[in-house]
Amino acid sequence: MIGRKTMGQASPILLIMLALGFFFATYDLLTMIFHHGSFGKWVAINSDGVLSFDPIIEMPENMRKRRNVKSLFHVAVTATDATYNKWQCRIMYYWYKKQTNLPESEMGAFTRILHSGNPDNLMDEIPTVVVDPLPAGMDRGYIVLNRPWAFVQWLEKATIEEEYILMAEPDHIFIKPLPNLARGGHPTAFPFFYIKPDQHEKILRKFYPEEKGPVKNIDPIGNSPVIIKKDLLEKIAPTWMNVSLRMKYDPEADQTFGWVLEMYGYAVASALHGVQHFLREDFMLQPPRDWGIGKRFILHYTYGCDYNFKGELTYGQIGEWRFDKRLFLRGLPPRNLSLPPPGVPESVVTLVKMVNEATANIPNWDTQ
Ligand SMILES: *[C@@H]1O[C@H](CO)[C@@H](O)[C@H](O)[C@H]1NC(C)=O
Ligand SMILES: *[C@@H]1O[C@H](CO)[C@@H](O)[C@H](O)[C@H]1NC(C)=O
């Protein structure tokens, strides 16, 4: 598989030469490099600063293509019919609709994959496909095990126009129009600092046997956010379900991985298929860990944000001002939440403003 890991093996000087070749793009220089190099491939740095490989012959055409033709991805979010999931999906869909029409966007259609088995009252508001939950008791109380099963069913029954799929979650807000971050068949993922395959070699070997390769082939990721080709996901999803269930039923893996077990499930399943992901930090930001917005695309409000009135983070203590999605487990966030006190980072202010904008504009926010 060509991926970021094989790049490390190429000589840095050759990479720099090839990259310079891209920028000056003089035909003679290229011909010279190809005559002298043993590479049958092009190495280039695209506009996002990501190294990519293209077969030599396709290069000029590809350069034009990247500028003019959109490579759309379908936005898919898995969810239940719980109030807690519903209000998050409504906010997410509001921001999807707003960003998808902007020129930089390569977002295609949107689907909420509803894995509680029955239609709910948002069927008219959000494009939805209903799939079955796992048989009762099979998830052993760990509801996110339904995610891989939901993707397996959806990929089987839905007609998906786009070649790529973004796997998203209800607590994602598109803060910018999202381009297709996948490159030349290779999926792109956000690296999570707490997914550390190299620290769990013994457990992971039960699911990723030695003959498959080194444990470092397992990416430090979960299934979301990931932009991936549909045909690759069709291969990975059944394995992801299988591996996650086996991990859940393995007491050692269950205890060690806890609430991130299903993330390890996806990381291992994709490695089993020889798929590696480009890792992009700018895919997502997570307040209050990340303070600024920078060039990031998705805001993930997974952590509680607690501050005192001086605008200082209170680290796990309940703050005088707070926003935490878990405050709204059973009821909706009201419209017009109070903004954080001065001094609170841009990421948190943006989160509250974007939630407020969505709830102000979604019809029947508090009567649905
Ligand atoms: C799931 O794993 C079992 C072995 O534990 C295997 O027999 C089965 O074929 C696997 N199914 C899929 C869809 O990978
Ligand atoms: C939102 O609340 C603030 C006070 O926190 C108030 O000044 C403002 O008028 C409210 N806006 C709307 C649209 O209700």
Image (tube, helix red, strand yellow):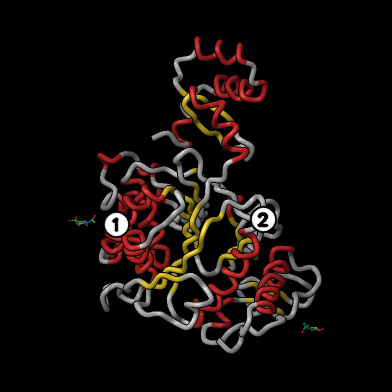
- Residue type at mark 2 is Leu
Q: Which residue lies at the image location 57% right of the left edge and 20% below the top edge?
A: 13
- Left or right position of 189 against 206: right
* Residue 183 visible, this orientation: yes
Residue 251 position by quadrant? bottom left
Label 1 element class: helix
Q: Which residue is label 2 attached to?
A: 102
- Residue type at mark 1 is Pro
Ligand 1 within 8 Å of disc 1? The answer is yes
Q: Which residue lies at the image location 38% right of the left edge and 73% below the top edge?
A: 130
Residue closer to the observer: 48 or 262: 48
Q: Which residue lies at the image location 52% right of the left edge and 83% below the top edge?
A: 329
Q: Which residue is label 1 attached to?
A: 238
Q: Is residue 78 above or below residue 229?
A: below
Residue closer to the observer: 335 or 217: 335
Q: Is residue 163 above or below residue 259?
A: above
Residue 270 picture location, percent across and down:
36, 49
Residue 247 picture location, percent across and down:
29, 61
Q: Which residue lies at the image location 60% right of the left edge and 23% below the top edge?
A: 16
At label 2, counting other C-alpha atoms closer than 10 Å, the crowd grade (few under 14, some 14-19, many 20 or more) is: few
- Left or right position of 316 against 130: right
* Residue 220 visible, this orientation: no
